[in-house]
Amino acid sequence: MIPPVGTIAPLSPSDASALQPARQAATSETGEAFSAMLGEAAANTVAKLGHAETVSLKALQGEADARDVVDAVMSAEQALQAAIAVRDKLVTAYLDISRMAI
């Protein structure tokens, strides 16, 4: 794993030493917030897919309307397409970073 920029030794230690802990804290909070957002989006996608499956099974048993099935399946499809788009962007970003010259 690549170390964060804040851990690189500064040119003048007296000026940069006061700023370094704040930079590391902000980076950590941003990373945690982004990770939590991705986890929540994945959980929502799985929940919508599960709901669509449940409603579809209820429709097969005659307990749900066709409109409910269509709404649930369309919502699940949109969530899945969004998750795939985010995955594709993350993979592209990772590949771009891995190709960078150091």
Image (cartoon, helix red, strand yellow):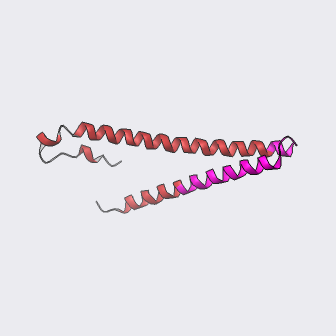
List x then y, in percent, for residue 33: 43, 40
- The picture quadrant where one finds residue 61 is top right
Magenta region, residue range: 57-85
Percent coordinates x, y for residue 69 in the rendering: 77, 48
Q: Residue at x 49, y 42 (%)?
A: 37
Residue at the far right: name it.
Answer: 62
Instruction: Locate residue 23 relative to residue 88 in the image: left or right.
Output: left
Q: Where does the image place residue 52, in percent across and percent down from the top left?
A: 72, 46
The image shows a total of numbered marks equal to 0
Identify which residue is drawn at 67% across, 49% down.
Answer: 76
- Quadrant of the image containing the C terminus: bottom left
Residue 70 is one of the magenta-drawn residues:
yes
Residue 60: x and y in percent read: 85, 46
Residue ID at (71%, 42%): 51
Magenta stretch, main secondary structure class? helix
Extreme residue toward the front, this view: 67
Seen in the picture, residue 52 relative to 99 is either above or below; the reply is above
Of residues 23 and 7, the one drawn nearer to the viewer in this rendering: 23
59, 67: nearer the viewer: 67
* 32 to the left or right of 51: left
Magenta region includes residue 63: yes
Residue occupying image coordinates x 36% and y 47%: 1
* 29 sits to left or right of 91: left
Q: Quadrant of residue 53?
A: top right
